[in-house]
Amino acid sequence: MNAQQNLTKRPYFLTDGGIETTLIFHEGWDLPEFAVFPLVSTPTGRDALVRYYERYLQLAKKHGCGFILEAPTWRASPRWASLIGYSNDELAGMLRDTAGMLAELRESYVSEDLPILISGCIGPQDDGYKPDVQLSVDAAFAYRSFQILEFAKTDVDLVTAVTMTYPEEAIGIANAAAFAGLDCVVSFTLETDGRLPTGELIHEAIRNVDEQAVTPPIYYMINCAHPDHFGALFAQPADWHGRIGGVRANASRLSHAELDEADVLDEGDPQEFGEQHGLLVKCLPNLKVIGGCCGTDHRHVDAAGSNLPQ
């Protein structure tokens, strides 16, 4: 059974919140280059990750939702891994170990009432807010194939490209996933004006990926923006709204430039965050996956789960 079929087992699936901001600001971890995956290599780090995910698994059970275990691999690609001293061989081993950890965690929690999918998280090759380099489709395919082919050797059910800032990289990832035989989800970063950091309208980016990818993503997500930044996009019905299957919003209303300069975490209002997701569900006919991005934690996802239709 593929990921898309598994997603029919529950009306809604929760996923986690802002793992990097949670570990840094709430738990005191030092994460060079915002990379979480190295924690898998130590017993203390591994325990911290298991505790982190277990909070969300318990929320999914509480709210009668399925759960998507998003691997902590946003920075686990050759460019970023090399910056913190990992060779490609070491990185490949880390990707397999991370997927193995999540498979063990799934085995402990999965049931008929709690379906769980494992997602291999793919982050951007450059900055997730303001990329200096934009890859061609072919270059993105070549760069991302390393990570995706390693995931394909494991129990990962799908790959999710998070904080994508322009269509070409998303197309390359979708093509690499198709080549590896994995389902793919693409999530775009949005600015305070509801556009991608490169200025493109999200419906144009979705259309470009759908038209040019060998196999289009099974759905799209919005990430790293507060609901106030993109809610107006759904004020009037449009066909492309049906391609939005997930939201991972920020807790803060600050712009990305302001967040980059902040040394204190803006946690926003978890209750308001939840209520806004209740409104999004009413606007987006295929919205199924809800989690959080920067500044969010289990409180925000709990509030969102409480606002889902029963």
Image (cartoon, rainbow, N blue to C red):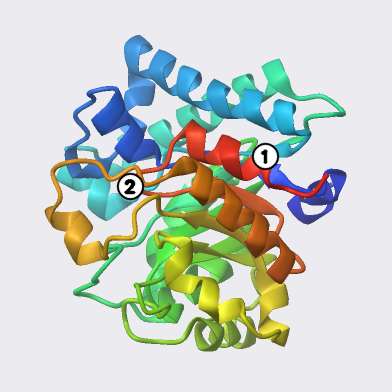
User: Element under label 1?
Assistant: helix
Residue at (39, 55) in percent of width and height: 123
Q: Which residue is mark 1?
A: 306
Considering only vertical position in the picture, is 138 above or below 176? below
Q: Quadrant of residue 57?
A: top right
Give the number of the mark in front: 2 or 1.
Answer: 1
Measured as percent of width and height from the top left, residue 36 is found at 33, 35
Q: Amino acid at mark 2?
A: Arg
Residue at 61 percent of width and 21 percent of height: 105
Pick whichever, 213 or 258, lies toward us. 258
- Three-letter code, disc 1: Ser
Percent x, y of residue 17 = 47, 41
Q: Which image quadrant: the C terminus?
A: top right
CB within 8 Å, label 2 to label 1 = no
Residue in the image at 85% along x and 51% along y? 8
* Secondary structure under the numbered disc 2 in the rendered image: loop
Q: Is residue 151 left or right of residue 182?
A: left
Residue indicated by mark 2: 75
